[in-house]
Amino acid sequence: MQCTQQIQNVHCPSCESPLIKLDDGCGVCGWTPKNFLEESNEAVGLKQSSKRRQRKGCLYKYLENKKLKDGTITSYPRVIQHRSSDNPTHWRWGFNWEEKIDGEWKGRSIGSVPVGAIALIQSMQNEGVSLEEIIAFIRRAKAKK
């Protein structure tokens, strides 16, 4: 590669020398990071933790179908007109997660989560609150019913 020009007012973050623009348009100063081809301990840790399965929880909506005395089946919660997928009061809510029991992952769930708790649970999930705290919150919310 041929050096065509120095780039004005742009400097290498490491050595602070002016960057050189090569014919292919790449800007370089010749500096190579110490661990360029080596994996840092931090990167190795991230790889190992990503291989491990993480415990997560999931809110889900569902309909409860019941057979009435006259034989017809109706869905709850009852909604007049159109059921909106964005309206939390138009659905029953549950929460499921997986737990490792005796070395094997098992699915667990809590049904009939109170509608008033849905927005709080979603915000807890977005904030990265631990699964144990979310489950405890749901159980407390159900106990207040």
Image: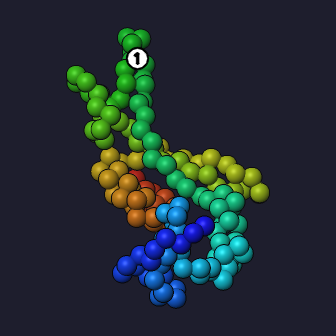
> Which residue is found at the position 39% from the left and 13% from the top?
72
| Furthest residue in direction right, as rendered | 103
- Image position, residue 25 (x, y; %): 49, 63
**Amino acid type, callout 1:** Ile
Q: Is residue 143 visible?
A: no
Residue at image mark 1: 73
For the N terminus, the image quarter is bottom right
In the shown orientation, is residue 127 left or right of residue 33? left
In the shown orientation, is residue 104 left or right of residue 57? right
- Image position, residue 145 (x, y; %): 34, 51
Q: Is residue 86 visible?
A: yes
Does 136 sit above or below residue 65? below
In the shown orientation, is residue 103 left or right of residue 29? right
- Image position, residue 7 (x, y; %): 41, 75
- In front here: 85 or 31? 31
In the shown orientation, is residue 139 left or right of residue 105? left
> Which residue is found at the position 49% from the left and 59% from the top?
135
Q: Secondary structure at mark 1?
A: strand
| Mark 1 neighbour class, 10 Å CA radius: few under 14, some 14 to 19, many 20 or more | few
- In front here: 128 or 21? 21
Does 49 sit above or below residue 104? below
- In front here: 33 or 20? 20
